[in-house]
Amino acid sequence: GAVVSQHPSWVICKSGTSVKIECRSLDFQATTMFWYRQFPKQSLMLMATSNEGSKATYEQGVEKDKFLINHASLTLSTLTVTSAHPEDSSFYICSARGRQGVAGWAVNTEAFFGQGTRLTVV
Amino acid sequence: KQEVTQIPAALSVPEGENLVLNCSFTDSAIYNLQWFRQDPGKGLTSLLLIQSSQREQTSGRLNASLDKSSGRSTLYIAASQPGDSATYLCAVRRVQAGTALIFGKGTTLSVSS
């Protein structure tokens, strides 16, 4: 199946600093990537949707200047949490959906998920 | 606005029991429905994907059904094992192309040996 690699898996940063999280599709072209956030014992909440080469679409209540999303290539999207604060501590996870894969299976109906990133801001 | 609800929030069963997890969604105009497994602090593992035109999907001891008109899905786990302990998430994808999944809060399952 399709593989989405997310890095880092966990990060601890000081309040006020910025953190970048990478999401890569390893064996298919991800035309659309989604970024979710999950607080403890809560569901995954969609933060933003990004299509390759265009600006991300943010969900209501998500600050686009704080959560910078770049999707400059068909295999890489990044989420940068700027000026992080303790309340930004959460589990961030990406998913990717794309074109026909190298292996021949259709990837345009499923979204494949990365392993997630546990962010702790101290 | 699509909302996904999962009942129960938590479930504890002894090993060997068959069990059913429930998922309901408010808008029946979905493209597909997907069940995931999430282990503590980990990402998601896709279990079953049901297209809107399908009624059920099976994989091993897992069987998922979909009744789109009533906005319901169930995940049936046969002969549960301690290794099945995890949180199970239900998610639906809206009809519009390129849309994200909308998740329920999940059911946390604990299977004791």
Image (cartoon, coloured by chain):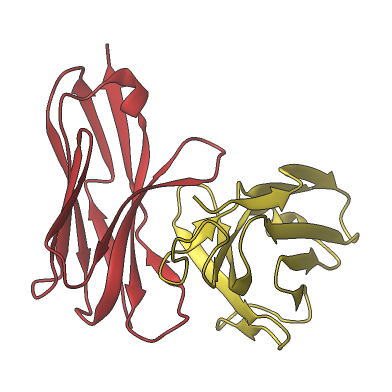
Q: Is residue A82 left or right of residue B71?
A: right
Q: As drawn, which residue projects farthest toward the top? A: B113
Which quarter of the figure has residue B1?
bottom left
Of the chain colours in the picture, the one used for chain A is yellow
Q: Is residue A19 above or below residue B63?
A: below
Which quarter of the figure has residue A80?
bottom right
Residue A42 is situated, as x and y percent measured from the top left of the image, at 45, 54
Residue B11 is situated, as x and y percent measured from the top left of the image, at 24, 34
Query: What residue is shown at x 22% (from left), y 75% (from top)?
Result: B26
Query: What residue is shown at x 54% (from left), y 54% (from top)?
Result: A2
Query: How many tags in the picture?
Result: 0
A3, A13: nearer the viewer: A3
Give the chain coloured red: B
Q: Is residue A43 above or below residue B30?
A: above
Q: Is residue A55 above or below residue A42?
A: below
Q: Does residue B89 appear anywhere in the picture?
A: yes
Query: What residue is shown at x 76% (from left), y 46% (from top)?
Result: A8
Q: Is residue B68 left or right of residue B4?
A: left
Residue A90 is situated, as x and y percent measured from the top left of the image, at 64, 53
Q: Does residue A71 appear anywhere in the picture?
A: no
A77, B3: nearer the viewer: A77
Query: What residue is shown at x 47% (from left), y 66% (from top)?
Result: A107
Residue B23 is situated, as x and y percent measured from the top left of the image, at 21, 57
Q: Is residue B35 left or right of residue B53?
A: right
Which quarter of the figure has residue A105?
bottom left
